[in-house]
Amino acid sequence: MKKKASNRKAGSSSDEASRLIDERIRELGDWRGEMLAQIRSIVKEADPEVVEEWKWRGVPVWSHAGILCTGETYKKAVKMTFAKGASLEDPAGLFNASLEGNTRRAIDLHEGDEINVEALKELIRAAVALNTGGAT
């Protein structure tokens, strides 16, 4: 019997993590998989040097000099959590969840939601700049 990706531990390589994320997208087989694939594509376009990881019993993580964001999937939402989101400017108002904390901020995406691709890329680039000490 084949184990689901969510039950596997992360490998030490980004290639293994990328394979597990591919598998998660396929396993979901619905709008959540499509949304996760779109998020992943946007993250990679915004930061071609991003490293994919697989943490916490099956959470896709994108890192560059530290965690940028995660892509968690729930029954009714795909949650993109930015590790240092409270420190990021969000002029487009993308953050709509985890707003009360001092560190993280999240974007909850639901079936049928459209992603503001350019604004999300800017947010990702700002997260990279924050992690690396560079300017946006």
Image (cartoon, helix red, strand yellow):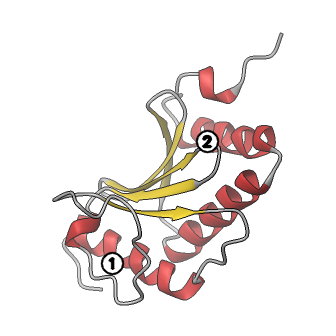
Q: Helix, strand, or loop for circle 1?
A: helix
| In the image, residue 25 above or below residue 63 | above
Q: Residue furthest top?
A: 1
Q: Who's the residue at 71% across and 63% down the image? A: 111
Q: Which residue position holds label 1? A: 126
Q: Which mark is residue 106?
A: none
How far, Cα to Cα, is label 2 from label 1? 25 Å
Q: Position of residue 125 (x, y in %)?
A: 39, 77
For badge 1, the amino acid type reads: Ala
Q: Which residue position holds label 2? A: 15
Q: Are marks 2 and 1 in contact (CB under 8 Å)?
A: no
Q: Helix, strand, or loop for circle 2?
A: helix
Q: Who's the residue at 73% across and 70% down the image? A: 112
Q: Nearer the viewer, mark 2 or mark 1?
A: 1
Which quarter of the figure has residue 96?
bottom left
Q: Position of residue 101 (x, y in %)?
A: 21, 57
Front position in the image: 49 or 72: 72
Which quarter of the figure has residue 127?
bottom left
Front position in the image: 127 or 85: 85
Q: Earlier in the sequence, mark 2 or mark 1?
A: 2
Q: Is residue 127 left or right of residue 119?
A: left
Front position in the image: 49 or 111: 111
Q: Is residue 93 left or right of residue 85?
A: right
Q: Is residue 11 left or right of residue 134?
A: right
Q: Is residue 66 left or right of residue 111?
A: left
Q: Residues within 10 Å of mark 2 (few under 14, many from 20)?
A: few
For badge 2, the amino acid type reads: Asp
| In the image, residue 1 above or below residue 27 | above
Q: Who's the residue at 54% across and 87% down the image? A: 118
